[in-house]
Image (cartoon, grey):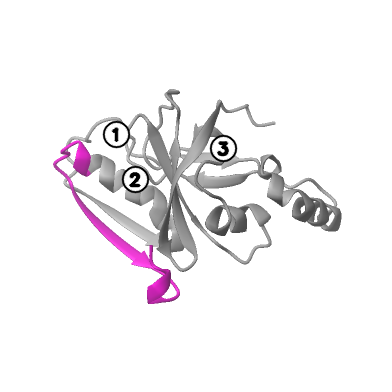
Amino acid sequence: MLPLMPRVTTEVAEVRRESAEAVTLRLDLGGQAFPYRPGQYVTIDPHQCGPLAEALRAREAGRGKPEGPGYYALSSDGLTASSLEITVKAKQDGSALVGYLAGGIGVGERVTLAGPDGRYALPESPPAGVTGFLHLCAGSGAAPNRGMIRHALGRGWPQRHLLIVQDRAEGDVL
């Protein structure tokens, strides 16, 4: 059994369209502390989203098991203590939560997150002897790297960053 991650309730402060199928949600922390390292992820339980109740019941009945949480990389830089960002790209995996976050959630709605977690993150300080970082990304995998690059630049780290992104079509690139 996985250990319980800390939970924080946020409010959607901004929904920013990144591509035809992706949005970045800026989530206001309401003064709560939420320390994380850029690149880590949070989880969101879809059962907290009232508009998804019917779709979740149908999916769970068809699969014969409860719908688990969605995992979303933090795409913010960790420099702003009042908010954080996740970038969500709609997929054809049948997840009602992904579709809701990418196209149905609105400003002012409350979302409870669990986390942060994950080891894919920048170190606490610039690593000595490292002159650069290579970020190889596909699709929405660019999201955690966006936060890492913004963090390093915002803190004046001396390393260079090269971001290479692959996606199915030019209009899909975040």
Query: Is residue 158 covered in magenta?
Result: yes
Query: What amino acid does circle 1 point to?
Result: Leu
Q: Mark 2 points at which residue?
A: 147
Residue at (16% x, 46% y) in the render: 131
| Residue 33 lies in quadrant | top left
What is the C-alpha distance between the residues marked 3 and 1? 22 Å
Q: Earlier in the sequence, mark 2 or mark 1?
A: 1
Q: Which mark is residue 79?
A: 1
Q: Horizontal placement of 65 versus 164: left or right? A: right
Q: Which of marks 2 and 3 is nearer the N terminus?
A: 3
Q: Do callouts 2 and 1 mark residues in contact (Cβ within 8 Å)?
A: no
| First along the sequence among labels 3 and 1 | 1
| Cα distance in 3D space between marks 2 and 1 | 10 Å
Residue 128 position (above or below residue 74)? above
- SS at mark 1 in the image: loop
The part of the image, by quadrant, that contains residue 17 is bottom left
How many badges with numbers are in the image? Answer: 3
Q: Does the magenta stretch include residue 17?
A: no
Give amino acid for label 3.
Arg
Residue drawn at the location 20% of the way across and 36% of the way down: 155
Q: What stretch is highlighted in magenta?
A: 153-174
Please report the residue visible at 47 percent of the width from the left and 61 percent of the height from the top.
22
Whether residue 171 sits left or right of residue 109 in the image: it is left
Residue bearing mark 3: 110
Callout 2 amino acid: Gly
Q: Which of 42 and 137 is in front in this view?
A: 42
- Residue closer to the observer: 117 or 83: 83
